[in-house]
Image (tube, rainbow, N blue to C red):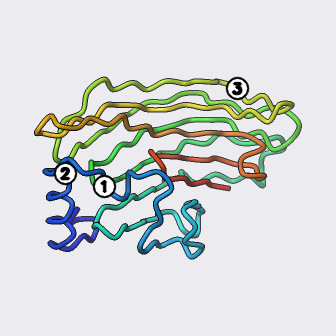
Amino acid sequence: MREDGSSQDDINSVINKLKNGEILDADKPNSTAFTTSDSNNNGSLTVTSENPTIHQKFEDGSYKKLRLVMEPTDFSTASTGASLYFKVEGTSVFGTASFNTSAFIDTHIGSSYITGVSGTSIHSIMGVYSEEKLVIDRLTEIRSKSIPAEAHLTYKHTSFSGVSAKTMDLRVKIGDHIDDRYGIAVTFTDGKGSYQ
């Protein structure tokens, strides 16, 4: 938490809530961020090449952070699309998760598809993780039905006290109709982001 800019007061607040078995603001459904690096501050985190990292902080000191790391790709020389290799990463007070994705983005009339996922990395804070699973849910986009290609990493985070357990989900979607735009969307628990 300190590496992500949390103050000692924020760290103490989060630890106290977890010790008491309380739900952190960052994990409550439809909770509103106290501050966010996304200028819209609307709970929908959008990651772009100009703004590759989004950080939402909540009043109790908990936070969500989403980052998309892209390898350089020149779409101008590709007539129908391009192969991409990128890493998606989600961060919360419970830790950080990431995995690598390779995909072909079709910019013409075909469908985009995922060519592989690998390189999972999970760092749990104030607990341990188990039941790690990296899966390609849908290899190829179904463009006619606006259904993207999709892959996800899930794991179970259990607090050191064993009082609480939470399933964490880091998901990537690739396709033509993501928030009415073409590109890549990334979600981690309740955080959301996309890259165009």
Q: Residues within 10 Å of mark 1 (few under 14, many from 20)?
A: many
- Dot 1: element: loop
Viewer-closest of 194 and 80: 194
Using the image, determine if residue 177 lies above or below residue 12.
above
76 or 142: which is nearer to us?
142
Q: Disc 3 marks which amino acid? A: Thr
Q: Mark 1 is on which residue type?
A: Leu
Residue ID at (54%, 71%): 41
Which residue is drawn at the image coordinates 20% and 56% (left, top)? 17
Mark 2 vs mark 1, CA separation in Å: 8 Å
Q: Secondary structure at mark 2?
A: helix
Judged from this view, the residue extending furthest toward the left is: 161
The circle drawn on residue 24 is 1
Asked whether, in this view, residue 115 is left or right of residue 131, the answer is right
Q: Name the disc covering residue 100, or none.
A: none
Q: Which residue is mark 2?
A: 18
Viewer-side label of 3, 2: 2
Q: Are marks 2 and 1 in contact (CB under 8 Å)?
A: yes
Element on which disc 3 rests: loop
Kind of residue indicated by mark 2: Leu
Tag 1 or tag 2, which sits nearer the N-term?
Answer: 2
* Residue linked to disc 3: 140
